[in-house]
Amino acid sequence: MNDENYFEHPLIEKNKLEKRLYQETILHTTINKNTLAVVPTGMGKTISAVLLSAHRLDKKGGKILFLAPTRPLVEQHKRFFNEFLEIACEDMKVLTGKVRPEKREKEYKRGMCFFATPQVVQNDIIAGRIDLDKFSLVIFDECHRATGDYPYSFIAEMYMKRAKDPRILGITASPGGSKRDIEKVMENLFIEDVEIRTEEDEDVKKYIKKVDKEWKKVELPQEFKNVKKLLEDAYDERIKKLRKWNHAPSGDVHRKELLKIQGRLRKKISKGEEDKLLYAGLSKSAEAMKIGHALMLLETQGSSSLYKYFKRLREEARKGKTKAAKNVMKDGKIATAFRKTSSLLERGIEHPKMDILEKTVREKLEEKPDSKIIVFSHYRDQVEKIKDRLGDIEGCKPVGFIGQAGDKGLSQKEQVSILEDMERGVHNTLIATSVGEEGLDIPSVDIVIFYEPVPSEIRSIQRRGRTGRQRSGKVVVLMAKDTRDEAYYWMSKHRERRMKETLKDMKTESENNQSELDEF
């Protein structure tokens, strides 16, 4: 390591960045190799990108491309770079689908630092609007997305082929649950080295803000359990049929296994196998999936969500859209469950988690009236219901935050506006679907509440990471006993533990390899 102070680089705003050893160590690796930087949320992953950008612009010239999955994230990173990098504001360009293609083509020629969504850049590469050999650095934010058909892989491949002196930086707090997942990301982004930090590392530990975690368990009311029993019986009948036809294994059969069953059956049918039990199996597995979804809504969301789903199934059946919907709604157990759910709704019996949520938010605002709160919920319908319920609390100023899809979806411009209003105090409680999980930096969030646990370790880490960034925070997870809530909680916990163990092993392996090189 040389004596150069990268935190006092001429292109870095003076006295703006706190010098941290782990960031400097990461920077030395990123200068020399395409690097995957795995750093806990709130520990300055974007600062690593700023420092490397300043170095590449100084030593290599060219342009910088910073990719992030959503427009709110793109806007956020642009503001961050604008604050810390000594580059004229007009040389920093935000390029999303809202910017016309012909204008984007001109902007690529004019600007120095570009902040863009990957779909836009992929389209511009294909159409020849962007000259990748002019870029000395490409940064992939939330780089765990670099799998499957996501544009990150395509962009990285084209960049490595066309750039004269390429450098890639991938940044994330949660790269994947297994070594295979992480290695796939590395392969797709042409990563040569890995810099990993965890909350336990000595050079990071002192900067970690304390985050208290609390799990609040609730018991389903008997009325819910009665409906649950009807749905479980209807579900089990379908699974027994699938087993009888040798389509399903013994033991528990959940959604993932049903999808595998459908895949196997479709493959056999596509090969021309003539067996009526193949089609019957497809139909029964589709019915089981619909009933399984109903069960999940009852257990984790409540009577209103289940009632709306039943209504949609009834409409599907009436219009003859799917045979599965028709068969499900003809089932006597389902019909009884529908009536009982309607009765629950009429009597105002909702999921007990809603009462606990209201109490938690109320107590937080009474304790600290200027609190900022984020509530995560998986379903849009529930977001609206939570917003209405919390709106009755004195001092609570809730706002929904959902994705773009659908008639009621929020455009990315509206999402950016909501986040700005949250920072200004127009709102103090953000109720978000998964669109709020990745990277959003809302300063000083005091408490994050999971309306339901999520099975993904990546999503769980991302959600928790919205608090404890600038000061200590709290995470509350609401959980219904003996339901999928508990199953999802334990899945996420086990996967996160496995991910941390994998990262530690990879870090040790990387350090050992470096020691061998140093000795050589």
Image (cartoon, rainbow, N blue to C red):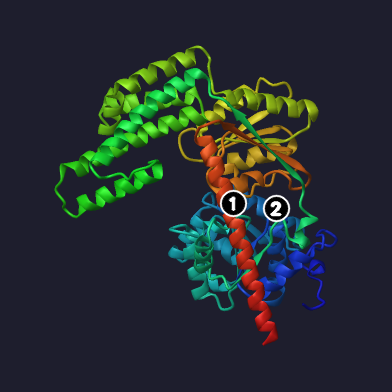
Q: Which residue is mark 2?
A: 79
> What's the amino acid at mark 2?
Arg
Tell me the residue that label 1 is attached to.
Answer: 496
Q: Residue furthest top?
A: 347
Q: Which mark is residue 158?
A: none
Q: Nearer the viewer, mark 1 or mark 2?
A: 1
Residue 212 x/y as whole percent: 73, 41
Work out whether mark 1 precedes mark 2 in sequence or the reverse, and give the earlier one: 2
Label 1 close to label 2 by CB (< 8 Å): no
Is residue 333 or residue 316 the one in the foreground? 333
Q: Give the vertical position of 230 relative to 443 (above or below).
A: above
In the displayed structure, 381 sits above or below 100; it is above
Q: Quadrant of residue 246?
A: top left
Local SS, label 1: helix
Q: Horizontal placement of 284 versus 518: left or right?
A: left
Q: Report the residue that reaches farthest toward the front.
A: 250
Tell me the crowding category of disc 2: few under 14, some 14 to 19, or many 20 or more residues within 10 angstroms, Cα based: few
Identity, as a three-letter code, of the amino acid under mark 1: Glu
Residue at (77, 48) in percent of width and height: 209
Quadrant of the snapshot with the N terminus: bottom right
The alpha-carbon separation of the residues under discs 1 and 2 comes to 31 Å
